[in-house]
Image (cartoon, grey):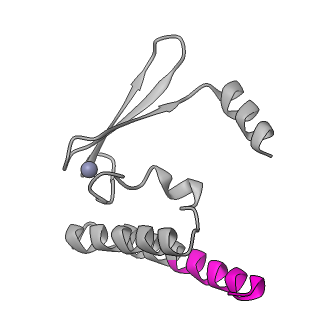
Amino acid sequence: MRYNDQHKVRVIAKERIEKLFRLASECHSRDPVLADRYVELARKIGMKCQVRIPKRFKMCFCKECNSFLVPGVSSRIRNRHDGKGKVIITCLKCGMIKRYPMNREKIRRKKDFIG
Ligand SMILES: [Zn+2]
């Protein structure tokens, strides 16, 4: 595949991923199974076209079971104040636990490092 084609594919893939997450957030209250399916499709597109899932959606799904995570419905969110500060997200479907650092300074430094 030529570079240009590959670029086009990635642009389209990214659009589709965003659309699928939007659809999932719209339909999860009516049809959670469908929302999970949208997440699964979005991740498949991402893997196939080598497109990362946008950062703002990273906390919205479970990596283990592809379920769409809605706080209080399909996930539980806890803050831990142990000096460092952490957000802990638990998937209520499979029990997978994700931890995110809350240290702003650290996050900023990481961002600067990556660019
Ligand atoms: Zn899960």
Q: Residue sitting at 71 percent across and 25 percent down?
A: 105
Q: Residue sitting at 44 percent across and 31 percent down?
A: 87
Q: Quadrant of the N terminus?
A: bottom right
Q: Main secondary structure of the magenta part?
A: helix
Residue farthest toward the front in the current orientation of the protein: 1
Reply yes or no: does residue 38 show up in magenta: no
Q: Is residue 12 found left or right of 95 in the rendered image?
A: right
Q: Residue sitting at 73 percent across and 40 percent down?
A: 111
Task: Note whether 107 is above or below 38 in the view shown.
Answer: above
Residue 66 image position (x, y, % from top left):
31, 60
Residue 40 image position (x, y, % from top left):
34, 69
User: In front: 24, or 106?
Assistant: 106
Residue 115 image position (x, y, % from top left):
80, 46
Reply yes or no: does residue 5 show up in magenta: yes
Residue 22 image position (x, y, % from top left):
46, 72
Based on the displayed image, in which of its 4 quarters is residue 43 positioned?
Answer: bottom left
Q: Is residue 73 found left or right of 88 in the rendered image?
A: left
Count of picture labels? 0
Task: Note whether 84 is above or below 97 in the view shown.
Answer: above
Residue farthest toward the top in the current orientation of the protein: 83
Give the magenta range: 1-16
